[in-house]
Amino acid sequence: MRKILLIHGPNLNLLGEREVETYGSRTLSQINEMIKKRAKKLGCEVRIKQSNNEGEIVSFIGEAKDWADALIINPAAYTHTSLAIRDAISAIGIPAVEVHLSNIFKRESFRQKSLTAGVCVGQITGFGPQSYLLALEAVMNILGEGKNADRKAAS
Ligand code: DQA
């Protein structure tokens, strides 16, 4: 069974009460339930972590090298600032997909730049909690296990 590490970055623990007009009213634990349900359906194991700390996120990514087949990450505000998280993703050499609830390209100019997307296979942005479900499907396809597995990611 394929193993996927999913990381939620800073302030995503506040979902449901934080800027609901932008991020919606679902809490992080409700979103995690949706993710686990979809993972079960797709036949993969997903381990979910959240941290508000850049160094801890770097460590989570480094530890994934030994067991995960793919990484899904919403680096939240660190998307726009963290070279350390970018380097960690690049260092482990497993396929990664970047996720955002909001469409970062519709927002302030400082959010329209991602330091991390360039070391990911791709980015899914703007579909609310569904962004995570789309990312799960994407990584399963990348790993050759999804229903569109014959369609290789464009390089
Ligand atoms: C976010 C977008 C980021 O710009 C922001 O800092 C977040 C959440 C999103 O999921 O839409 O915290 O990553």
Image: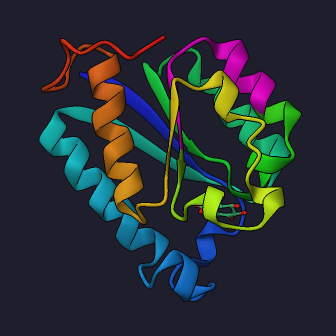
Q: Using the rendered view, name the quadrant where residue 107 is placed.
A: bottom right
In the picture, measured across the screen, residue 40 lies left or right of residue 88, that is left
- Which x, y percent locates residue 53? 81, 53
Q: Quadrant of the N terminus?
A: top left
Q: Is residue 18 left or right of residue 85?
A: left
Residue depicted at x 36% and y 72%? 30
Q: Estimate the x, y position of residue 96 in percent, counting from the top left.
A: 53, 27
- Residue at x 60%, y 70% (from the top left corner): 13
Q: x, y percentage for residue 46? A: 36, 39
Residue 62 seen in render? no
What span is colored magenta in the figure? 86-98
Above or below, 56 relative to 100: above
**97 within the magenta span:** yes
Q: Nearer the viewer, residue 130 or 89?
A: 130
The answer to which of 17 and 24 lies nearer the viewer is: 24
The residue at 25%/43% (across/down) is: 39
- Quick check: which quadrant has ligand 1? bottom right
Residue 96 visible here: yes
On the image, the x and y values in percent for residue 12 come to 61, 67
